[in-house]
Image (cartoon, rainbow, N blue to C red):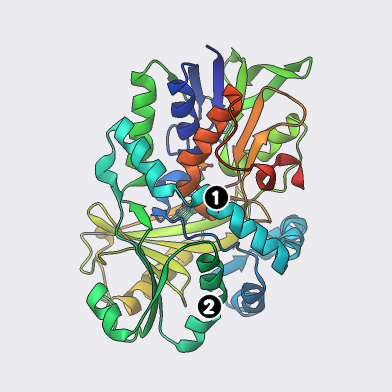
Amino acid sequence: MAEIIVIGAGIVGLSAALALQRDGHRITVLDPAGPAGGASSGNAGWLSGASVVPMSYPGMLKSVPGWLMDPLGPLSVRWAYLPKATPWLWRFIKAGTRPQIERQATALRQLLGTSVEAHRELARRVGAQHLIQQQGSLWVYRTQAAFQADAGGAALRRARGVVVEDLDADAIRQLEPSLSREIKFARFVAENGHCTDPAALCHLIAEAIVREGGQILPERAVALDQRDGKVVSVRTDRANHPSDWVVLAAGAWSAPLAVQLGDRIPLETERGYHLEITDAQAMPRVPIMSGEGKFAATPMAGRLRLAGTVEFAGLAAAPDWRRAELLLRHAQALFPALPATIAEARLSRWLGHRPSTPDSLPVIGRSRQAANAIHAFGHGHVGLAGGPHSGRIVADLVAGRPPSIDLTPFSPGRF
Ligand SMILES: Cc1cc2nc3c(=O)[nH]c(=O)nc-3n(C[C@H](O)[C@H](O)[C@H](O)COP(=O)(O)OP(=O)(O)OC[C@H]3O[C@@H](n4cnc5c(N)ncnc54)[C@H](O)[C@@H]3O)c2cc1C
């Protein structure tokens, strides 16, 4: 039995902690913000094995200049932050060649293809079965041009075994009557699931970890003390914790700690927003992705969550809540039953930090410098879906078992 420190109590760290605990290890999870204090609470809740399309691909890059000209478009860069983001953005553009995209999509399918199954298994263990749904998800479009523009993404999914169904206007109406009649094109993926309360899920995992003898401490890891090629203790803002193994799962905040482990990872925060409407007048039956607005509308427990947009502005900049309002405006056009004015008391807003690498693949694997340190971060847009599987992989690496998938594409040394 080993003493293992997990840095970060998001879905990835908590899933790893739980999987390691099942192998009999003593677990301490460190997080100054507590469980679900980062991106894992306010995300769109999609458990999408179909999300294999990397963010950098030629079709998308063509749209970028237009998006950037519009301060409230789906993608924005705060100009003061541009010099800081440029090296990452350059790598991001370079990652979008056809052969790389094919490889990235295959790797993502390997990691995410079992998302719903992995979540169900985890949920059974922590009593969260009620939070995991499998009703499929729907990508919707007003115009044929937008529908066609996403055909490349659909082809990537189909080539990896995802069943993607094209729907005409009548079929859309039958499946999702809440949608505007202006929506004429859609693609449906039946295998997808969603989580109706990602924060509650994280809290239930955290409670299970504590129930089974682990501890979750509100501490920030600041230094990883190493001797003879191994981490011997994790120093925090409050204490020093000796450790046999360390798992680095601090989401968008992981890069400085990874540097201490000898791994320089290009990690950027793709800031995203949500706006939630409690007891919304329109409630889709299935999670919906707006092809034009590039945001998700997910039916959550008691509320409709609108989530999306990408903003490059770093970890510290204040939120730009206009980006959350933009989601509401898009949703009002998508769902006619949503009124033009909604009482402020029913709305809530959130900003989160997607931990993103230029090639849209997380970093999962041993550190190059410390043999007992494992990286598990950088899941970008798909960390909720990929968290439980990533956690199991971490436990396999600690146990010396062959992991369920080939980890070469996720290697910390690939950059
Ligand atoms: C708007 C939006 C919508 C999204 N929608 C989806 C979706 O539908 N499906 C999906 O799969 N993914 C989605 N994502 C992505 C997903 O939320 C993330 O990939 C995922 O939550 C990352 O999990 P994580 O555990 O790596 O990081 P986080 O949840 O961010 O957790 C990292 C934790 O580390 C802690 N930490 C930081 N520094 C330290 C330190 N020094 N010491 C200790 N702890 C530290 C932080 O406090 C934080 O709690 C979305 C993201 C956003 C922003």
Q: Nearer the viewer, mark 1 or mark 2?
A: 1
Q: Position of 74 compared to 306: left or right? A: right
| x, y percent for residue 402 | 60, 32
Query: How many tags in the picture?
Result: 2
Q: Position of 4 compared to 57: left or right? A: left
Q: Earlier in the sequence, mark 1 or mark 2?
A: 1
Which residue lies under the disc numbered 2?
151
Residue 168 picture quarter: bottom left
171 over 8 or under it: above or below: below
Circle 2 sits in a helix, a strand or a loop, which is it? helix
119 over 269 or under it: above or below: above
Disc assigned to residue 263: none
Tell me, yes or no, if residue 318 can be seen here: no
Circle 1 sits in a helix, a strand or a loop, which is it? helix
Q: Position of 248 compared to 209: left or right? A: right
Q: At label 2, which amino acid type do we have? A: Ala
The one nearer the camera, 33 or 249, is 249
Which residue lies under the disc numbered 1?
110
| x, y percent for residue 173 | 25, 80
Q: At label 1, which amino acid type do we have? A: Gln
The one nearer the camera, 126 or 10, is 126
**Point 58% across, 56% down: residue:** 270
**Point 74% across, 35% down: residue:** 259
The one nearer the camera, 126 or 225, is 126
Q: Is mark 1 within 8 Å of ligand 1?
A: no
Gap in angstroms between the C-alphas marked 1 and 2 = 21 Å
| x, y percent for residue 307 | 42, 61
